[in-house]
Amino acid sequence: MRVLWFEVTVPQNYSKHGFHGAGWQDALESIVNDFKDIELGIAFESRDCSNKMQIINEVHYFPLCPHYNCIEKLKSKTSWELSRNKLIPLSINVIEEFKPDVIHVFGSEWCFGQVTEFTDIPVVVHMQGSIPSYNNAFYPPSYNEWDEFIYSFTHFKWKNLFELPMAIKKQRTWKEQEEYTLSIVKNFMGRTEWDKAIVKLHKPDANYFHCNEALRPYFINTELEWSPTTNQKLILTTIGCSSLWKGLDTIVRTARLLEEHKVNFEWCLVGNICYKELIEWKEKILIDDINIRLLGMLDSEKLVNQLLCTDIYVHTAYIDNSPNSICEAQYLGLPIIATYVGGIPSLIENGLEGVLVPANDPYILTNEIMSLAIDRERQIKYSKNSRKRAIMRHNPKIILKDLLNIYNNLLSN
């Protein structure tokens, strides 16, 4: 069986360098490539037009490099339409060259699912996030786009003032692009009740298949497992605050409350931290002054070490599907407190595998952190149950079996 994937990030085996935020796709690639009855091709957008098609470890890699003139580059800052018009013809060329039996598209947010209009080959879209829902939670309560304008103006960030209106307009066209994709594609796959509901809302007669997400090999292969720590201070960890909907404002407010209640803690943030200055300005406090430590990007080994010395993993997003950060923390057996949003309730059963709290409620979150921090019995209970579920959910053999069943189902129909 020949299967062609469309991804929005450069596969790790192709680039061989840099950080790869879509490590779970690389993990799934490794699982599928070990199954020799599938001949895999992967197409992806590349900004380096010197990149050519390569075959590496029997996988065909097709970089798609759209060319933009100066005017087109400016237009592309306000709309996704131009990108779509460039990428779809390039995608059709790859389909004609590779001649797949099945086309597997990662992400309904991107234009690649729209190749279904130009081919009779079955196309399945693998749900990731969903821009209409994300746009609904784009700004936290009490925040809006005027905050960004005022902050940029008062802090002399002239580039932001010029680019912000274009970015806002482009975000709206991104929503329209996904809604169109959801309306024309017949087959979807996902792993939570949330992404299933999104599919059925936009396409009631769509076929929806369940397939869990692969985790990075380092997490699957490590024999390390979380156990209650002996830290002198409470260590909290959160991974990923790259957008406002990830809840950095909630972290700041909760950290301030923990300080007011004399909790000896340190809150470690991993990853690219965006909007830090905006939130400090809005909340009228510096992150460094409330025991929040920015660790930056960490590779798998360093991240595992950080999680193993953590007391509680905390996830504060306003919207999310099935964040890898939670899944990886579960796999190691960390006690978890997360917001009850999106697909997270499909990952964690409240009171059995962790604690689910309302979004935008730093008071409840503070109380739950303080309560769980001194309850070793609950920590161990959550750790054991959560890890057991994660090991079953992310079993590579089961994921491969489910994926093959989906591909065969598409072919038989």
Image: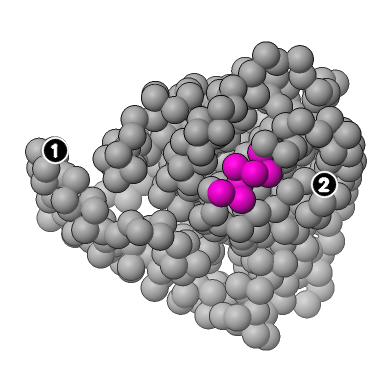
Q: Quadrant of the N terminus?
A: bottom right
Compared across the picture, whether 258 is left or right of 75 comes to right
Residue at disc 2, secondary structure: loop
Q: Which residue is mark 2?
A: 353
Residue 331's quadrant in the figure?
A: top right
Front in this rendered view, residue 322 or 295: 295
Instruction: Name the residue rendered at 72%, 67% in the picture.
Output: 193
x, y percentage for residue 219? 75, 29
Instruction: Report crowding for label 1: few under 14, some 14 to 19, many 20 or more residues within 10 A (C-alpha).
Output: few
Q: Is residue 131 visible?
A: no
Front in this rendered view, residue 50 or 270: 270
Whichever of callouts 1 and 2 sits on the residue coming sooner in the sequence is 1
Q: For residue 367: magenta? A: yes
Compared across the picture, whether 186 is left or right of 51 comes to right
Residue 211's quadrant in the figure?
A: bottom right
The amino acid at mark 2 is Glu
Q: Is residue 105 above or below residue 204?
A: above
Compared across the picture, whether 2 is left or right of 241 comes to right
Front in this rendered view, residue 69 or 276: 276
Front in this rendered view, residue 337 or 75: 337
Instruction: Name the residue rendered at 33%, 68% in the picture.
Output: 173
Instruction: Name the residue rendered at 57%, 40% in the picture.
Output: 22
Q: Which residue is mark 1?
A: 155
Q: Is residue 318 visible?
A: yes
Q: Is residue 372 above or below residue 44?
A: above
The amino acid at mark 1 is His
x, y percentage for residue 148? 23, 51
x, y percentage for residue 126? 63, 60
The answer to whether mark 1 and mark 2 are in CB contact below 8 A is no
Tell me which segment is drawn in magenta: 363-369
Residue at disc 1, secondary structure: loop
